């Protein structure tokens, strides 16, 4: 059992789909990076503070 797609045409091509995907990433990408950066920044600052406080105790 197979489906016959002989008369079917799509209103967009693969290049159009790729362009719209890249366009969406250029809009959403910076916000995703900011959402990842804030938790990583707090962990990095905590690690740096911990390293300096351990150095003073020794």
Image (spheres, rainbow, N blue to C red):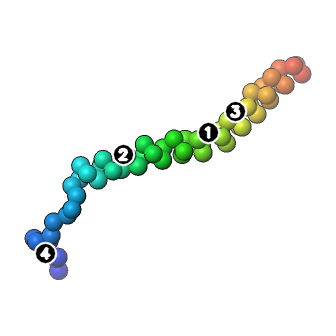
Residue at coordinates 41% horizontally, 49% vertically from top-left?
24
- Which mark is first along the chain, 1 or 2? 2
Residues packed near mark 3 inside 10 Å, few (<14), some (14 to 19) or many (20 plus): few
Report which residue position mark 4 lands on: 4
Specify the farthest residue to the left: 6
Report which residue position mark 3 lands on: 44
- Which mark is first along the chain, 4 or 2? 4
Please report contact status of discs 3 and 1: CB closer than 8 Å, yes or no: no
Please tell me whether mark 2 or mark 4 is closer to you in this view.
2
Residue at coordinates 36% horizontally, 50% vertically from top-left?
21
What is the C-alpha distance between the residues marked 2 and 1?
22 Å
- Which mark is first along the chain, 4 or 3? 4
Q: Which mark is residue 22?
A: 2
Residue at coordinates 67% horizontally, 35% vertically from top-left?
41
Report which residue position mark 1 lands on: 37
Left or right side of 44 for 33: left
What is the C-alpha distance between the residues marked 3 and 1?
10 Å
- SS under mark 2: helix
- Which mark is first along the chain, 2 or 3? 2
- Which mark is first along the chain, 4 or 1? 4
- SS under mark 4: loop
Specify the farthest residue to the right: 57
| Quadrant position of the C terminus in the picture | top right
| Quadrant position of the N terminus in the picture | bottom left
Q: Does 47 sit above or below residue 52?
A: below
Left or right side of 2 for 50: right
Residue 19: give x, y in percent of width and height. 30, 47
What is the C-alpha distance between the residues marked 2 and 4?
32 Å
Residue at coordinates 61% horizontally, 39% vertically from top-left?
37
Left or right side of 53 for 4: left
Please tell me whether mark 3 or mark 1 is closer to you in this view.
1
């Amino acid at each position: 059992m197979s489906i016959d797609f002989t008369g079917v045409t799509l209103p967009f091509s693969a290049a159009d789909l790729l362009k719209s995907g890249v366009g969406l990433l250029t809009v959403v990408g910076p916000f995703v990076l900011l959402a990842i950066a804030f938790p990583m920044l707090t962990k990095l600052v905590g690690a740096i503070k911990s390293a300096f406080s351990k150095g003073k105790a020794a």
